[in-house]
Image: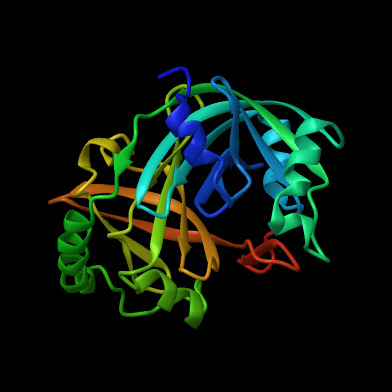
């Protein structure tokens, strides 16, 4: 669809939701950010309020194609793509964001910039397939040992490894499609098999995930219910017998106070 209906606009306007934006980094690879302020200003325009400055804000301005995903507390989700077009540090949208209780009464953070996007497309509403996720997640718990390496890489810290191997962790994958737009899909069924590899069952979202080809550079975000998250990037190895995996090449710390790559240590891109 090329426009957002009123029901979807109302869901996007809620403060408590999961909202992700995928931009394109300096290496031409997807970069996922948790930006809960993402809203629909109208049927064809999105806004996002910036209160913490990370690399994604620069990425989306320099390479303006982005992808997004919004998930409600009722586990309904929408995704789509848009084009960054402008930013403002004052005006009605700036005032609106700073009147939201989360920011109005926050001593440390307020919205200092509002970003504007033209909608390119948006999906219909999907319901998170919890039955399929649980079945495939449990299957993954047994099968993933086949992918585990004898020498465990050190890409993930112990905390991040536990986050990614937990079946209850929300997980999302992003890749860049044929038109140059980042796309984001849920992959809650995925799990880390060691500190350098994430195994992804193709189901229950086989139609969507089949778009990711062998050798594609992807980003994977893991997020717990406290909204603590870790972003990893690497190469996707295609689905065989319904299972694929990502070799982790870079790890990005998304949490304040310091944003940046933490693996490999020398990487500053």
Task: Measuring from the top left, give residue 249's x and y in whole percent.
Answer: 50, 59
Nearest the camera: 117 or 247? 117
Residue 12, image x, y percentages: 52, 39
Q: Nearer the viewer, residue 59 or 72?
A: 72
Task: Reply above or below: 138 against 112.
Answer: below
Would residue 138 be found to the left or right of residue 197 on screen? left
Q: Name the residue at 81% across, 40% down.
A: 95
Q: Residue furthest right?
A: 90
At horizontal 70% and vertical 50% (from top left) the residue drawn is 100
* Left or right position of 35 against 237: right
Which image quadrant is residue 38 in? top right
Residue 45, picture quadrant? top right
Coordinates of residue 78 in the picture (x, y in percent): 40, 38
Q: Quadrant of the N terminus?
A: top left
Q: Is residue 19 visible?
A: yes
When asked about the image quadrant of residue 266, the answer is bottom right
Q: How is the image coloured?
A: rainbow
User: Residue at position x 48%, y 19% from top?
Assistant: 3
Instruction: Using the image, determine if residue 31 lies above or below residue 224.
Output: above
Residue 62 in the image: above or below residue 225: above
Q: Nearer the viewer, residue 245 or 259?
A: 259
């Amino acid at each position: 669809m090329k426009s957002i209906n009123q029901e979807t606009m109302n869901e996007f306007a809620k403060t408590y939701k999961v909202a992700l934006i995928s931009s394109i980094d300096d290496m031409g690879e997807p970069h996922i950010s948790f930006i809960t302020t993402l809203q629909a200003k109208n049927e064809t325009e999105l806004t996002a309020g910036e209160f913490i400055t990370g690399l994604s804000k620069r990425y989306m301005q320099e390479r303006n194609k982005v992808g997004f995903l919004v998930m409600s507390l009722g586990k309904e989700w929408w995704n789509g793509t848009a084009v960054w077009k402008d930013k403002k540090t004052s005006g009605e949208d700036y005032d609106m964001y700073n009147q939201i209780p989360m920011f109005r009464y926050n001593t440390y953070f307020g919205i200092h910039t509002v970003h504007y996007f033209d909608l390119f497309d948006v999906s219909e509403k999907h319901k998170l397939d919890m039955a399929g996720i649980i079945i495939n997640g449990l299957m993954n718990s047994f099968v993933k040992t086949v992918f585990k390496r004898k020498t465990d890489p050190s890409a993930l810290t112990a905390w991040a490894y536990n986050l990614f191997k937990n079946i209850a962790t929300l997980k999302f994958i992003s890749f860049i499609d044929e038109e140059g737009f980042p796309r984001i899909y849920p992959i809650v069924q995925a799990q880390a098999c060691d500190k350098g590899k994430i195994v992804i069952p193709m189901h229950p979202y086989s139609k969507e995930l089949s778009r990711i080809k062998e050798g594609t550079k992807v980003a994977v975000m893991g997020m717990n219910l406290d909204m603590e998250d870790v972003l990893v990037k690497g190469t996707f190895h295609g689905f065989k017998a319904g299972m694929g995996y990502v070799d982790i090449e870079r790890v990005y710390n998304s949490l304040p106070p310091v944003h940046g790559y933490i693996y490999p240590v020398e990487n500053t891109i």
